[in-house]
Image (tube, helix red, strand yellow):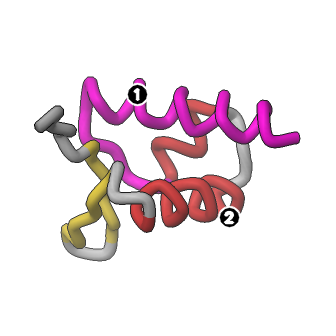
Amino acid sequence: MIRGKNVVEEKIIDILSKDLMSTSQVAKKLNMRREVAIGYLEALMNQGKLEKTRVGRSIIYRTIKQTND
């Protein structure tokens, strides 16, 4: 199951590296329930890979540029 989780996380990072998206947009793009997408998005945010911003009633996610120091 860990491998499947990594695949989903990689897909999320890939789509968010190209464009900002709301939770619902990410869920729709990955064909999963919004609640499941929220879990992945929050986990990636806790790992420091994503950040979120509230725009009106929506929460928008984007990737954080990683630096190799």
Q: Name the residue type under label 1.
A: Ile
Q: Quadrant of the C terminus?
A: top left
- Which residue, given by chain and number where applicable, does mark 2 sit on? 35
Q: Is residue 4 magenta?
A: yes
Quarter location, residue 15: top left
Q: Where is residue 38 in the image (x, y as percent from the top left)?
A: 57, 62
Q: Position of residue 26 (x, y in %)?
A: 50, 42
Above or below — where is 32 with respect to 43? above
Residue at image x 78%, y 33%? 4
Residue farthest to the right?
A: 1
- Which residue, given by chain and number where applicable, does mark 1 sit on? 15
Residue at image x 72%, y 41%? 5
Q: Where is residue 23 in the image (x, y as percent from the top left)?
A: 47, 55
Q: How many labels does the image show?
A: 2
Above or below — where is 43 with respect to 8? below
Q: Position of residue 13 (x, y in %)?
A: 42, 34
Q: Is residue 63 magenta?
A: no
Q: Give the range drawn in magenta.
A: 1-23
Quick one: SS at disc 1?
helix
User: In the displayed structure, does residue 31 sit left or right of residue 69?
Assistant: right
Q: Name the residue type under label 2.
A: Glu
